[in-house]
Image (tube, rainbow, N blue to C red):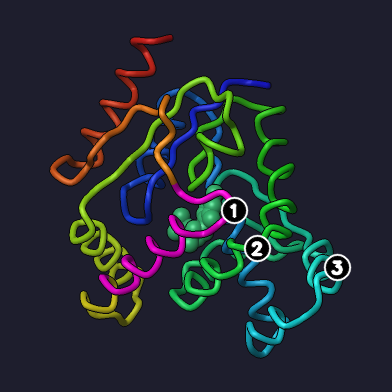
Amino acid sequence: MKKVIAIDGPSGAGKSTVSREVAKALGFQYLDTGALYRAVAYYLLKKFNHINDFLSLNEQEIEKEIKNIKIHYKNGRVFLSDEDVSDLIRDPKVGEITSQISMLKVVRDFLLPIQRNFAKEANIVAEGRDMTTVVFPDAWKKFYLDASTEIRAKRRFEQLIKSGKNITFEEALKDVIERDKKDSLREISPLRISSDAFYIDTSELTLQEVVSIVLKKVAEDA
Ligand code: DC
């Protein structure tokens, strides 16, 4: 296994921007595991009229559907077969379905080897909800990024508005609260702070300051 910098935290804590910048500074590959979960959700959303049509299948059928998914990830872009779905998966509707399907063991089991394979080929900065605990428990460095609920909702709101989505701050806040609940209360691989992860509260920091803290910590312990 190559070097893995594992970064976990709730949505809106700044993981994507920080991970991308840290990867760039160190010459590591960036792995956005949320994009993989989102791509699975997008695939299912396109295939089934309603997500309940998928969720009501029996276990074998669900497994068969998931196994058929041809997912690829390269240089921060995610593909279903040959289609680049990186922008399409950012739709809030896809995010909502993602938090539902990421609770399924069959989905997590499907994505586990795909995520681990990246660390066989290159040094990576991997971000998600269970990088430090389940996917890369022996990671070279571990970080947990956090921020207050309001700040995370504000960041999500601004990000969605910037990308042309029609959303109010209240909707963004509700979305963040709901997502937190689902991510941390689920039975399999819930979001939790690993005891050996370096905790950073990013509420009062700029993302550039967080990048500097991470890089300093990595250099200190290297
Ligand atoms: O980081 P994100 O917002 O793109 O993640 C989308 C959803 O995927 C979120 O509800 C949590 C889930 N997820 C997960 O369960 N495990 C991961 N390693 C990454 C994301």
Quadrant of the snapshot with the N terminus: top right
Residue holding disc 3? 64
Can you tell which mark lies on residue 104? 2
* Residue type beneath disc 1: Ile
Confirm or reject: label 3 Cβ below 8 Å from ligand 1.
no
Distance from disc 3 to disc 1, alpha carbons, whole Å, reads 20 Å
Q: Which one is in front in this view, the residue at disc 3 or the one at disc 1?
A: 1
Element under label 3?
helix
Type of residue at label 3? Lys
Asked if ligand 1 lies within 8 A of label 1, the reply is no
Question: Which quadrant would residue 65 be assigned to in this image?
Answer: bottom right
**Which residue is nearer to you in this view: 210 or 104?**
104
The amino acid at mark 2 is: Leu
Specify the segment rendered in magenta: 173-191
**Can residue 34 be seen at all in this image of the molecule?**
no
Which residue appears at 25% of the width and 57% of the height? 152
Mark 2 lies on a secondary structure that is loop
The numbered mark, 3 or 1, whose residue comes first in the sequence reads: 3
Q: Camera-side residue: 222 or 30? A: 222
Q: Position of residue 37 (x, y in %)?
A: 60, 59
> Is 158 placed above or below 125 here?
below
Secondary structure of the residue carrying tag 1 is loop
Neighbour tally class for label 3: few under 14, some 14-19, many 20 plus, Cα within 10 Å: few
| Residue matched to label 1 | 188
- For the residue carrying disc 1, how many other residues have a C-alpha within 10 Å: few (<14), some (14-19), or many (20+)? some
Q: Are marks 3 and 2 in contact (CB under 8 Å)?
A: no
Classify residue 106 by image quadrant. bottom right
